[in-house]
Structures are given as structure tokens and as C-alpha cells.
Amino acid sequence: MNIEAAIAARNEFRIGEVAIRFEGPLGIISGPRMGSTGPARVASDDLRELVRTDDHGRYRPLPGARTMPGGWEVRCHSADELLDAIDAIYPLALRHIGQHERGELRVIPLDEVLRRQSGRYAVAASLGVEGRKAACNTLCGRCVRTPVWCEAALPPGGIPCPEPCSVLVSLCREAALWDTSPPAPSAPVAGLPFARFDIPGNEVRETYLADRAGAPLAGSPSLNATALPGDDALVG
């Protein structure tokens, strides 16, 4: 999807969890719908701060996580303001989309990212193939970006993810430790910090552990199985 062309033609489109439409001279970005009340208007200058937390006030360490706060809209008066607003919501998404369309996107696989970890994160490289698959399935399934670094097919209008993020590396670190000393499962606890994988009850943690035990949690988001990398793609 060429977003700049869509804006120039004033065609409605979606990116991630937000929708863009046009009314007169305005380009309007709407966040996820929330109840039956109308959206609150937010200034474009306040948008970056707004999307730092979810509806429960929890910090969103993964900008693409499907935890975008809802019930808001931003009215942009120019194409540049609209593009800047999209970049505030999904940093680097526009650049990566353009690079992918031109065949210029530099993709770095998980194996390479884990190999270069040091210090307390060096243990992440010891996570086996099945653990890496489960980590990708668990975390990337909660993100609007498509992990093209594991050869996932980019859907129309999708946002390519060229490299495993630091949140996934953190999950792989914890997962490697769990493999050597498996923790007892706990019921997911709403409201726990998204990336505190060391805390029992963290939803991502419990989903990963259930996946590895062969009993996925009901309703947990995941990648399509066909989009996951094979063993060769994971181990390099």
C-alpha cells in the first residue's frame, strides 16, 4: 500500500489499529472504537504521549502491540501533519513500508539478533528452535507488524517488521531460563505490565508456557502457523 498516494488521492485506508478518512480539507485518524460514545479529539502534538500507554494506563513497550488506547481521533490539516501523526503512532512504519515496496528493506533474522546479545541477555541464544517458534508465535501474534524477518508473508496494507525487537529478545531470554527450570503455570492476571515476563500471571508469559506445554490458552492471539519460520530459517 502506497500511503502517500492514498493520502494524495484522499482514499480511506487502515494501518494497524487506526483508520484514516478524509472530510473536506481534513485528514482524520481514528483510534480503536470504544463503546458507543463519540471519539475524543486529540491534538496531533499530544498523540505520541497518548499511545505510550493502554486503556489501563500500562506502558506500551511494543508500539505495534494491539493494546492501542481507544476512543480518540486526530484531525490533521495537511498531508505532512497526517504522515507525522502516523509516524508518532507506529514509529518507522512508513519508512519500512516504503523500503519493502522498493525491495530495499534490510531484514535481520532472529538467529543473528540473538547471537549478538551479551551480558544478561546472552543466554537468549541458547533457546532452541521450538522455543523460538513459540516466542515468535506468542509475541508477534500480539503485534500489528508482520515479522518478515521470519519469512512471514506481508498481507495487503500490512506493516513489515524487518528485525526482531528488544521485547522479543527479552522474552527469548526468559524462555531460555524456563527451558532449564520450567515454572509452574499460573492464571493470567489482568493489569500486569506487558513485558514483565518474569512475573507469574503475565499474559505473554503464561501463553508461551501453555504453548510449550501443548495446551494453548483459549482466545490467545497468534500468528498463522503457515507464517512461522521453519527450523532452517530459525537456526540460520
Image (cartoon, helix red, strand yellow):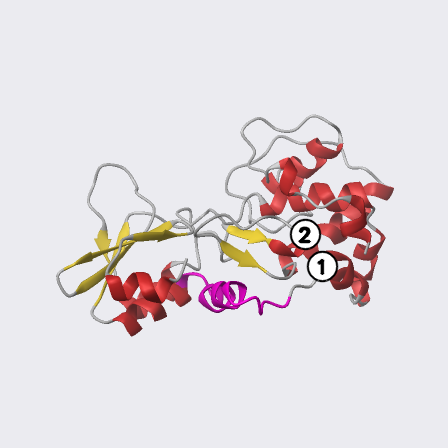
Residue at horizontal 78 percent and vertical 41 percent from the top: 130
Question: If you read the primary sequence from the N terminus, does the residue marked by circle 2 or circle 1 appear first?
Answer: 1
Which residues fall within the magenta stretch? 89-106
Q: Which mark is residue 109?
A: 1
Q: Is residue 75 visible?
A: yes
Q: Nearer the viewer, residue 123 or 143?
A: 143
- Amino acid type at mark 1: Pro
Q: Position of residue 149 (x, y in %)?
A: 66, 56
For label 2, the residue is 150
Q: Nearer the viewer, residue 110 or 183?
A: 110
Residue at horizontal 39 percent and vertical 47 percent from the top: 55
Residue 97 among those drawn in magenta: yes
**Is residue 123 left or right of 21 when viewed as pictured?**
right
Q: Position of residue 214 (x, y in %)?
A: 73, 27
| Quadrant (top left, top right, bottom left, bottom right) of the N terminus | bottom left
**Is residue 127 left or right of 26 when viewed as pictured?**
right
**Is residue 49 left or right of 128 when viewed as pictured?**
left
Q: Is residue 62 visible?
A: no
**Is residue 169 left or right of 13 when viewed as pictured?**
right
Looking at the image, the residue that sits furthest to the left is 24
